[in-house]
Image (spheres, coloured by chain):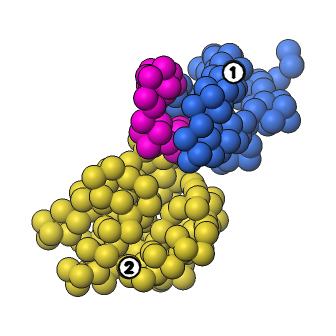
Amino acid sequence: MNASSKSIKILLVEDVKINRMVMRMMVKSLGLEMEEAEDGQKAVDYFVGGKKADVVLMDRDMPIMNGHEATRQLRSMGVETPIIVLSADDSQSNRDVFLQAGADEFLQSKPPSRKELVDVLTKYGLY
Amino acid sequence: MASMNPKERRDAFADSMIAEGLLDQQFNQLLMLEEDGGGFLVEVIKLFCDDSERMISELSSLIDQPVVDFQKVGSFVHQLKGSSSSIGAHNIMVACMHFRQFCEQNDKQGCFRALNAVKNEYYRLQAKFNILVQLSREC
């Protein structure tokens, strides 16, 4: 499957503007669609508001609500969308907290390379 | 360099910055993305510089306080490290990692030294970025 055969929507949850800009360009270069949430609360509100995404790319450290809590809340709401964590902290404790909260995957390079992003989207049948 | 076209001049200058250690391979990824969208590179450099200057100014004010809010300092350092990583500003990223350690130890003098290191690296990079932006605009 590739981007031209199905419209894939990514929700990026990231507080740093420049990180969002770089990811936006990367996702655009893949021909995919992306929406953005500046913190975990906005990501929760996104789904509460009835919007849908095919995959969530989740940062950890954000104001208002961090990635751990946002992941926990999304799962407790019954959101089944794959949650891929983008965090420079690849410690086992960080992974454990995310996995216990309900995250599916952990990308330790932030920002990810184009190849890493394509690989993980392919793994979930999204590219 | 005189026989090069504008894009080759820009890429050669970026390569020299990478060779110097000011930037890492992440910047090459941005150069590749620039092929897809005109003006992206200049926009991202400008945003990085504006954000960095704002954060350095905030950090300077926070560290000058009689009682330093190390959690707040750490938060700004984390943001600066994140944006440095996105643009490939390797030396600033490393300086931020040292800075973060001093924050965790509530070490005011260490933070002061680390801030100066971040400032020095930022101004070194900014001077080169000014040239790179000029070269990018000629492309």
- Taking the image as shown, residue B85 lies to the left or right of residue A43, namely right
The amino acid sitting under disc 1 is Asn
Q: Percent from the top left, x then y, of residue A42?
A: 24, 57
Q: Percent from the top left, x then y, of residue B1?
A: 86, 19
Chain ID at mark 1: B
SS for tag 1?
helix
- Up the image or down, A71 lies above or below A34; here it is below
- Circle number at residue A102: none
- Up the image or down, B64 lies above or below A23; here it is above
Q: Does the stretch in magenta take in B62?
A: yes
Query: What residue range appears in magenta?
Result: B55-82
Examine the residues drawn in magenta and state their main secondary structure. helix
The amino acid sitting under disc 2 is Ala
Where does label 1 land, which residue?
A: B120
Q: Percent from the top left, x then y, of residue A11?
A: 35, 63
Between B82 and A63, which is closer to the camera in this rendering?
A63
Where does label 2 land, which residue?
A: A101
Q: Does the stretch in magenta take in B74?
A: yes
* Residue occupying image coordinates x 62% and y 60%: A109
SS for tag 2?
helix
Q: Which chain is blue?
A: B
